[in-house]
């Protein structure tokens, strides 16, 4: 028997075949969310699929899936990455919708991981999302700086590690988001400092070279000005 984990695309494809056979209207993004949530289990995927289809009267949409499974919309993560300055307001809006801070920070870490994967043509295949969402990741990965993605991913992961033991869990997430807001500024300052250091080193090298040439010229002139010694 083959007990390997079933791929997300395979589960979504199987659900789509069932939908066609049963005349159920579906959105590909919604099927992929179910497949991701099932985490390789076809039985779990079928159970979620049947439940949502019955609730929506055979009209399974992306929104109906995330509403029924209590999953945060991808758009929040894309907005947060595009408009970093509004992170605290977006996080507050997410909490007001009843989502847990830990689930949010985990989802944000996964989002940055997906952006990192989308930056390399060889690793794009690791994106387990629908084609529509994949295009969004590819577009945002082109505009997002690699240094920002790596630093933000590290901050999100660090927040997740200390979240459960914190007495003020909301503050931990907000601190991580505030730090993310300033990543680009820190990178810019670091680059300017590096450039300034390089310029200083170039100036020192030029000064040393100029002094050496001056001493050499002075020595040559003093040698020419001396009278030959008479034996």
Image (cartoon, helix red, strand yellow):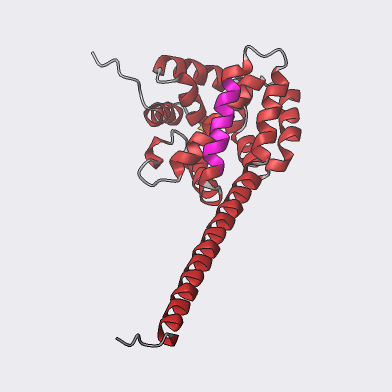
Residue drawn at (71%, 36%) of the image: 87
Place residue 158 in its image quadrant: top right
Q: Position of residue 181 (x, y in %)?
A: 68, 40
Q: Is residue 159 magenta?
A: yes
12 or 110: which is nearer to us? Answer: 110
Q: Is residue 125 above or below residue 8?
A: below
Q: Is residue 215 magenta?
A: no
Place residue 118 in its image quadrant: top left
For the N terminus, give its image quadrant: top left
For the C terminus, give its image quadrant: bottom left
Q: Is residue 89 left or right of residue 131?
A: right
Q: Is residue 61 visible?
A: no
Residue drawn at (62%, 38%) of the image: 75
Q: Is residue 218 visible?
A: yes
Q: Main secondary structure of the magenta part?
A: helix
Farthest-out residue, left = 1
Place residue 171 in its image quadrant: top right
18 or 154: which is nearer to us? Answer: 154
Q: Position of residue 31 (x, y in %)?
A: 49, 29
Q: Is residue 52 above or below residue 167?
A: below
79 or 194: which is nearer to us? Answer: 194
231 or 70: which is nearer to us? Answer: 231
Q: Is residue 162 above or below residue 154?
A: above
In the image, the segment drawn in magenta is 148-160
Residue drawn at (45%, 79%) of the image: 217
Q: Position of residue 107 (x, y in %)?
A: 57, 28
Q: How many marks?
A: 0
Q: Position of residue 222 (x, y in %)?
A: 45, 81
């Amino acid at each position: 028997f083959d007990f390997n984990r079933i791929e997300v695309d395979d589960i979504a494809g199987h659900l789509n075949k069932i939908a066609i056979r049963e005349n159920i209207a579906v959105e590909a993004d919604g099927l992929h969310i179910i497949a991701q949530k099932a985490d390789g289990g076809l039985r779990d995927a079928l159970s979620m699929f049947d439940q949502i289809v019955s609730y929506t009267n055979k009209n399974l949409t992306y929104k109906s899936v995330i509403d029924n499974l209590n999953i945060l919309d991808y758009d929040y993560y894309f907005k947060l990455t595009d408009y970093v300055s509004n992170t605290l307001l977006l996080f507050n809006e997410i909490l007001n919708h009843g989502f847990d801070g830990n689930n949010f920070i985990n989802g944000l870490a996964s989002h940055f991981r997906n952006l990192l994967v989308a930056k390399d043509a060889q690793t794009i295949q690791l994106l387990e999302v629908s084609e529509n969402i994949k295009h969004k990741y590819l577009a945002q990965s082109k505009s997002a700086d690699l240094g920002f993605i790596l630093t933000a991913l590290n901050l999100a992961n660090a927040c997740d590690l200390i979240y459960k033991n914190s007495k003020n869990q909301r503050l931990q997430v907000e601190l991580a988001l505030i730090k993310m807001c300033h990543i680009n500024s820190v990178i810019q300052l670091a680059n300017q400092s590096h450039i300034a250091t390089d310029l200083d080193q170039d100036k020192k090298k030029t000064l040393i070279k100029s002094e050496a040439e001056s001493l050499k010229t002075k020595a040559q002139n003093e040698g020419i000005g001396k009278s030959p010694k008479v034996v």
